[in-house]
Amino acid sequence: MSTRFDTGMKVRREVLGAAHVDRAEAAKSEFDAPFQTLITEGAWGTLWADDTISRRDRSLLTLAMLAAMGNFEEIPMHIRATQNTGAKPEEVMQAFMHVAVYAGVPKANHAIKLAKETYKELGVDL
């Protein structure tokens, strides 16, 4: 039987990609290991592992919440993850437009800037 941590690592790799997870694991130290376990079990092994809503929808929700809260650092990572979750650029734009109306234009504007930069790095034509 798989543990919540094992499930979390599997889902994390499927969503973020093995290379990203391998880099994060290599950078893990004794200091942040408890935090890494927390997010692997909680975010990835519980929330993202639940199939009540699709990974595409979960991806769009995550991007909108990151932008609305001004947590811009993780937006590029989650834009890259859309390649694995199936969220399309036009759907991401709609999520950010919701952010503009409900959380503020400056937050949406910055999120869109980050998304455009990341899509360009990925070779996605917008």
Image (spheres, helix red, strand yellow):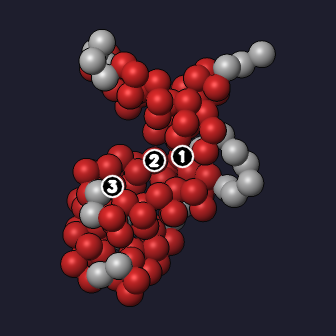
Disc 2 is placed on an element classified as helix
Q: Is residue 35 visible?
A: yes
Which amino acid, mark 2?
Ala
Residue 37's x, y, as percent? 46, 24
**Rendering quarter of residue 45:** top right
Can you tell which mark lies on residue 81? 2
Left/right placement of residue 40 relative to residue 112 reads right
Measure the C-alpha gap from mark 3 to mark 2: 10 Å
- Up the image or down, 63 lies above or below 32; here it is below
Residue displayed at 46% across by 39% down: 16
Residue in view at x 37 percent, y 60 percent:
66
Graded by Cα atoms within 10 Å as few (under 14), some (14 to 19) or many (20 or more), the crowding at tag 1 reads: some
Looking at the rendered structure, the secondary structure element under dot 3 is: helix
Q: Of residues 52 and 78, which is closer to you in this image?
A: 52
Residue type marked 3: Ile
Of mark 3 and mark 2, the one earlier in the sequence is: 3
Query: Mark 3 against mark 1, which lies toward the viewer?
Result: 3
Give the residue pinned by disc 1.
Answer: 84
The picture places residue 115, in percent across and down from the top left corner, at 31, 62
Mark 3 near mark 2, Cβ–Cβ under 8 Å?
A: no
**Which of pointers 3 and 2 indicates the residue nearer the eye?**
3
**Which three-letter amino acid code belongs to the residue tagged 1?**
Asn
The residue under label 3 is 75
Which class describes the residues within 10 Å of circle 3: few (<14), some (14-19), or many (20+)? many
Q: Nearer the viewer, residue 3 or 11?
A: 3
For the C terminus, give its image quadrant.
bottom left
- Please report contact status of discs 2 and 1: CB closer than 8 Å, yes or no: yes
